[in-house]
Amino acid sequence: MKRSLSIVKIGGNVIENETELERFLHYFSKVEDPKILVHGGGKLATQVLQRLGIEPKMVGGRRITDAESLDVITMVYGGLTNKNIVARLQANGCNAIGLSGADGDTIQAHKRPVNEIDYGFAGDVDGINEGLLSHLLTLGLVPVFCALTHDGKGQLLNTNADTIASEVAIGLSELYDTTLYFCFEKKGVLMDVTDEDSVIEYIDSKIYTDLLNQGIIADGMLPKLTNCFHALRHRVTKVCIGHISMLEENASPYTTITL
């Protein structure tokens, strides 16, 4: 029987809110091992770029990562944000190890091809080093990934943190019974975006299609749920979306997604 593995991704709004981040790290440290954490840090990267007089470039909500931006993103994601999270997890009794996809060749990617838009040094994941990650987990370490991968030719790539979480869950699903958690500021997928308590507690493929046709799932939630079902179709057991408190025992309602 496979061991259970929790893969948790936290959004930028949690990272930027000191109180919420501290609560999250406390909850996460109590999750039973083995577990993996994935984080972004886009808002802080944008702030640092602006302080340096570099105007962030965005198209349709997606960042254009030129060489100058990549330098800053590497410093913020792989340095400041990642190491602060790792240090604070250690303070919570969680033996974390900070990683980018380049460390230990843990996540391989390629530069996104140019079609209508050139996203610069944006990476699309090709695969993960499940053997090394499994070894780290067996040693009792908790990998903490920032949103950086590499192409195997010396180039770092800025990669969507939701995608990294999904691909890590997929890659380890042959060895573990994987559950993927997306923690953000909302309580889950909402029936009514103006009502924080209108959480849809269970979504399967049929319900998802119905919600799409009704226009209830749209905008920023659409790519997130696309990622969720991609993971489920590739052996991930289930996906949960909700507030950081869903990691607690006796958690308040959140959304669970299955096929």
Image (cartoon, rainbow, N blue to C red):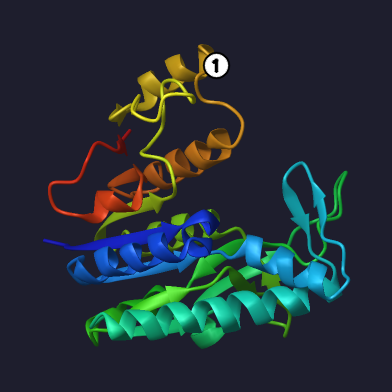
Judged from the image, the secondary structure of the residue bearing numbered disc 1 is: loop
88 to 122, vertically: above or below: below
183, 92: nearer the viewer: 92
225 to 40, vertically: above or below: above
Total count of labels = 1
On the rendered image, what quadrant is the C terminus found in?
A: top left
74, 125: nearer the viewer: 74
Q: Residue at x 72, y 66 (%)?
A: 47
187, 110: nearer the viewer: 187
Q: Residue 42 appears at what percent x and percent y?
A: 64, 62
Q: Residue at x 53, y 62 (%)?
A: 16
Q: Quadrant of residue 153?
A: bottom right
Q: Residue 181 appears at what percent x and percent y?
A: 35, 52
Q: Residue 13 appears at what percent x and percent y?
A: 52, 55
**Res 135 seen here:** no
Q: Quadrant of residue 166?
A: bottom left
